[in-house]
Image: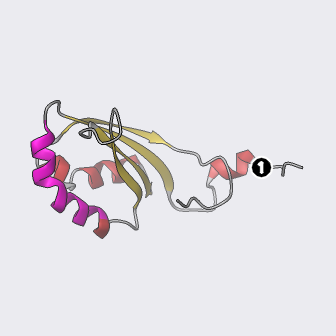
């Protein structure tokens, strides 16, 4: 038997003072060397912000390929807080990012996410 979920309650997040956002980053084309130069500083930055950047990782066209961007799930009060966070990331300050998209994200199922 499938459990019934109150999807409106799951996505409303009304009891919290934060919202979930998905951020899709696009690196500048051909910037693999710059990414490698900035990677250690970026990873240290992500580790220092893991209370807000809940999930982070690079995106590739194929396994083992050079990353073309990244994806984060961020827990923040609002979109402006996400923009302010992105502005401090070494990948942003170092000139790697060509662009990014910020989406409000609603987690559909109640169980915790783990890998």
Question: Which residue appears at 61% of the width and 62% of the height?
Answer: 112
**Residue underneath mark 1:** 6
Place residue 59 in its image quadrant: top left
- Secondary structure at numbered mark 1: loop
Relative to 19, 35 lies left or right: left
Q: Residue furthest front?
A: 64
Question: Which residue appears at 68% of the width and 51% of the height?
Answer: 109
Measured along the vertical axis of the image, is residue 30 above or below residue 79? above
Q: Residue furthest right?
A: 1
Question: Which residue appears at 64% of the width and 49% of the height?
Answer: 12
Residue 1 x %, y %: 89, 49
Residue 54 x %, y %: 43, 60
Relative to 90, 100 lies left or right: right
Viewer-closest of 71 and 85:
71
**The magenta stretch spans which residues?**
31-46
Residue 13 x %, y %: 61, 54
Question: Which residue appears at 52% of the width and 44% of the height?
Answer: 105
């Amino acid at each position: 038997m499938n459990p019934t979920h109150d999807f409106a309650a799951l996505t409303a997040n009304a009891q919290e003072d934060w919202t979930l956002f998905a951020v899709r980053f696009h690196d500048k084309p051909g910037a693999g060397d710059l990414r490698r130069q900035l990677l250690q500083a970026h990873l240290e930055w992500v580790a220092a912000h893991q209370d807000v950047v809940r999930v982070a990782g690079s995106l590739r066209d194929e396994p083992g390929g050079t990353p073309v961007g990244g994806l984060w799930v961020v827990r923040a009060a609002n979109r402006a807080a996400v923009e302010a966070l992105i502005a401090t990331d070494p990948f942003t300050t170092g000139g790697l990012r060509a662009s990014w998209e910020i989406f409000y994200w609603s987690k559909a199922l109640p169980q915790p996410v783990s890998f």
